[in-house]
């Protein structure tokens, strides 16, 4: 017969070839410079994250979220946390031009779990998870956040010396902190802030400013009932009772007398 049918088993090829392709690559530091210069944005593919020499995370991108966006998000996620230095995190990324209808990420996790006798520890740990929303603040913290809680004693460079409106300072914290910062608005849009933030100014002094110091300046301009609560993966700023408590709560800050 002069006719036959051939179907390429793409999942089998990926399972066999892709881990070896990753093995032949050198990992790059997870920095904005490397992300900007080394990867193609808007591309579909798979990537690995390493902490030191240990493979800790397997991920994939799709047509909606490219490499630059995804890796930059991960860089932000590991910044300003205890027990981890972003300089120790590296990545490998491979653009894949032909995608098949199968779960590439799950396949790679399975293959590396077999190879290393252990699953990449950041997969299914809560690493890179989305903001769960105000109504879920009382959920138990994720394993990743318990191991690497946020560090509010890191220097921030987005509040220069001088006078700032309290709302501008709050918006700067929300826009620039590498973790979730949420605050009460009294029902107003988040850009408008709470009415207690209106017509209030704070003064940032010369010298390095940490997130803790910035929060204390903000609290100094708010009524006594306001509190900044540090959770393993975020900071929230709300009017709170003294006995208010959240699962995994690290500390609570009040304005100084």
Image (cartoon, rainbow, N blue to C red):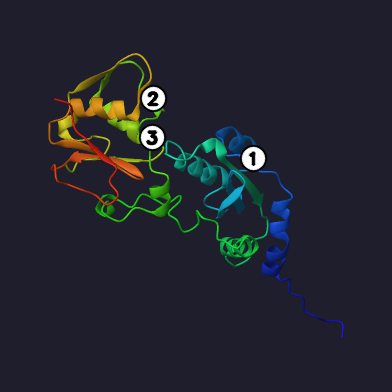
In the rendered image, which residue does mark 2 sit on?
158
Whether residue 10 is visible, yes or no, is: yes
Which quarter shows the C terminus? top left
Relative image position of residue 121 (x, y in whole percent)? 51, 55
The residue at 72%/54% (across/down) is 21
* Relative side of 215 to 87, left or right: left
* Residue at the spot of label 3: 177
Q: Nearer the viewer, mark 1 or mark 2?
A: 1
**Which residue is labeled 1 in the image?**
28
**Relative height, residue 102 to residue 257 (above, below):** below
Mark 3 lies on a secondary structure that is loop
Asked whether 188 or 107 is in front, the reply is: 107
Judged from the image, the secondary structure of the residue bearing numbered disc 1 is strand
State the residue at coordinates (52%, 37%): 86
Q: Position of residue 20 (x, y in %)?
A: 73, 57
Task: Classify 10 Å Cα crowding around label 2: few (below 14), some (14-19), many (20 and above).
Answer: few
Gap between marks 1 and 3, in whole Å? 24 Å
The spot of residue 50 in percent (x, y) is 59, 47
Q: Are marks 1 and 2 in contact (CB under 8 Å)?
A: no
Identify the image quadrant of the N terminus.
bottom right
């Amino acid at each position: 017969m002069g006719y036959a049918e051939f179907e390429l088993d793409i999942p089998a090829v990926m399972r066999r070839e892709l881990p070896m392709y990753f093995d032949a690559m050198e990992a790059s530091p997870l920095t904005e410079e490397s992300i900007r210069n080394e990867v193609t944005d808007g591309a579909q593919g798979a990537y690995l994250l390493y902490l030191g020499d240990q493979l800790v995370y397997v991920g994939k991108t799709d047509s909606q979220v490219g490499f630059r966006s995804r890796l930059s998000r991960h860089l932000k996620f590991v910044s300003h946390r205890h027990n981890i230095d972003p300089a120790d995190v590296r990545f490998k990324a491979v653009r894949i031009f032909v995608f098949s209808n199968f779960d590439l990420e799950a396949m790679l996790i399975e293959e590396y779990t077999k190879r290393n006798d252990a699953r990449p520890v950041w997969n299914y740990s809560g690493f890179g998870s989305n903001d769960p929303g105000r109504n879920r603040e009382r959920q138990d913290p994720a394993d990743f956040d318990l191991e690497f809680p946020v560090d509010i004693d890191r220097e921030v460079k987005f509040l220069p010396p001088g006078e700032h409106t309290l709302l501008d300072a709050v918006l700067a914290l929300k826009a620039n902190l590498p973790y979730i910062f949420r605050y009460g608005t009294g029902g107003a849009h988040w850009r408008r802030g709470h009415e207690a933030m209106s017509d209030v100014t704070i003064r940032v002094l010369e010298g390095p400013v940490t997130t803790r110091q910035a929060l204390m300046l903000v609290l100094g301009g708010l009524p006594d009932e306001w509190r900044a609560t540090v959770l393993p993966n975020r900071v929230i700023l709300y009017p709170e009772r003294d006995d208010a408590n959240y699962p995994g709560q690290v500390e609570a800050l009040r304005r100084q007398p």
